[in-house]
Image (cartoon, rainbow, N blue to C red):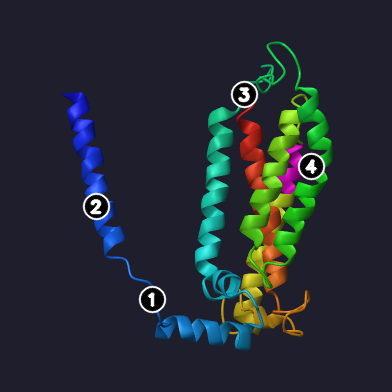
Amino acid sequence: MRRVFILLVVAGFGVIFAGLVAGYGERQTLSALATFYLTEVPADLGAANVVTGILISFRGFDTLGEVAVLFMVAASVGVILASEPGDKPLLLPAIGGKGQGPSELVRNGAEVVLPLIFLFGTYVIMNGHLSAGGGFQGGAVVASGVMLMMLAYPTGPLHHGFLSITEALAGVFYVSIGILGMVLGGGFLDSHILPRGDFGTLISAGAIPLISILLGIKVGAELSVIIDRFRS
C-alpha cells in the first residue's frame, strides 16, 4: 500500500511537471519592467551587471533582510551546537581511515587549491558590479575554501573571536552606508554617495563595489562559523 501511494505521488508530480514543460514558451520580447531595469541600471547606477545593481541598490532592504536571516541562522547554529565547557571538540571524520588524519591527496590538494579558491572568491566579490558574482556568491566561495581547509587540517581551530568582530564590523559599515544613502542620496543604500566613475571599470558604479565587499566579508565569516560549528 505504501509503495502504491508513493508511485501515485510520483506520477502526480510527473503530470504536473509535464504540463509545465509542455506549456513553456520562451519569451521573444522583453517586458516593460525588464526594459526599464536594463536601461536604468547602467545609466543611473553605472553598473554593468544589472542583477547586482538591482540587488544591492534598488532592493537594498531585501538584501539587508537576507543578511539578517543569515546572521540569525549562524547564531542559532552556534547556540544549538555549542559544546559545554571542558568538552573536547569532535574532529571531522578521518578521510584516510579510522583513527587517521586526512589523506595525503587531500592535504596536498588543499595546499594547491586553497589559494585559488580564496583568490577566486575575492575576484567574484570585487567584480560583482561588472560580471556575474557579488558579495553573497563570493562569500560562499570563500566559505567553501574554509570547509576544504577544515578537511585538510581537522585539528586547526578557527579564530571565532576574529570572525565575530569582522562580521560585526562589516554589518555595521553596511548599515552605515545605507543610512548615508538616506542622508546624502535618495534612499537606503543609494550608491550615488560615491562618484560613479567610468562605466565598465573596476572602480565604478558608486558605492556598489564597497557594499558588495562588505556583504562578501559578512557572508563569508558567517558561513565559516556555521561550518566550523558542525565539527565541534
Identify the image quadrant of the C terminus: top right
- Residue wearing tag 4: 113
Judged by depth in the image, the label closer to the viewer, 1 or 3, is 1
Query: Mark 2 falls on what kind of element?
Result: helix
Q: Nearer the viewer, residue 61 or 216?
A: 216
Q: What separation in Å lies between label 1 and label 3 (alpha carbons)?
A: 53 Å
Looking at marks 1 and 4 on the same chain, the residue that comes earlier in the sequence is marked by: 1
Looking at marks 4 and 3 on the same chain, the residue that comes earlier in the sequence is marked by: 3
Type of the residue with mark 4: Val
Residue 156 showing in the rendered view:
no
Q: What separation in Å lies between label 2 and label 1 (alpha carbons)?
A: 21 Å
What residue is rendered at 22% in x and 34% in y?
7
Is 7 left, or right, of 66 in this rendering?
left
What residue is rendered at 75% in x and 40% in y?
161
Looking at marks 4 and 2 on the same chain, the residue that comes earlier in the sequence is marked by: 2
Residue 77 is situated, as x and y percent measured from the top left of the image, at 55, 36
User: Do the residues bearing badges 2 and 3 touch, measured as CB atoms within 8 Å?
Assistant: no
Q: What separation in Å lies between label 1 and label 4 (alpha carbons)?
A: 41 Å
- Residue wearing tag 1: 27
Judged by depth in the image, the label closer to the viewer, 2 or 3, is 2
- Residue wearing tag 3: 83
Residue 24 is situated, as x and y percent measured from the top left of the image, at 32, 66
Residue 181 is situated, as x and y percent measured from the top left of the image, at 63, 78
Is 87 left, or right, of 197 in this rendering?
left
What residue is rendered at 79% in x and 42% in y?
114
Q: Nearer the viewer, residue 86 or 208?
A: 208
Q: What number is the disc on residue 16?
A: 2
